[in-house]
Image (cartoon, rainbow, N blue to C red):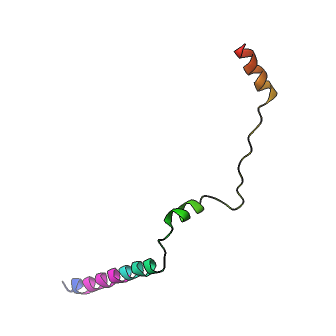
Amino acid sequence: MSVLAFLIPVTLAMGAIGLAAFFWSLRNGQYEDLSGDAERILFDAQDRPLTPKRASPRRDTISKETTT
């Protein structure tokens, strides 16, 4: 029973610290642009669109023969 007298105040103190940290993050704007950060991590500054690949000549002749 004496352990509970120690653990209950420690638990309440940890909860209060966590709640204070949450309210601190709200005041400092940590949750203002959630979708922007989620999308920004997917793209790199050096990314460029892919260029379309050209079809090989053999592929064109095969498709022309089979369609005729």
- In percent of width and height, residue 61 lies at 78, 21
Residue 54 placement: quadrant: top right
Q: Which stretch appears magenta?
A: 6-17
Q: Which residue is pictured at 81% across the width and 27% down the height?
A: 57
Instruction: Out of 51 and 10, give the one closest to the viewer.
Output: 51
Quadrant where the C terminus lies? top right
Q: Which residue is pictured at 56% across the width and 59% down the height?
A: 39
Q: Which residue is pictured at 59% across the width and 62% down the height?
A: 40
57 versus 48 height, above or below: above
- In percent of width and height, residue 41 lies at 59, 62
68 versus 4 height, above or below: above
- In percent of width and height, residue 10 lies at 30, 84
Q: Examine the residues drawn in magenta and state their main secondary structure.
A: helix
- In percent of width and height, residue 59 lies at 76, 25
**Outermost residue, front side:** 32
Instruction: Out of 43 and 11, give the one closest to the viewer.
Output: 43
**Outermost residue, left side:** 1
**Outermost residue, right side:** 57
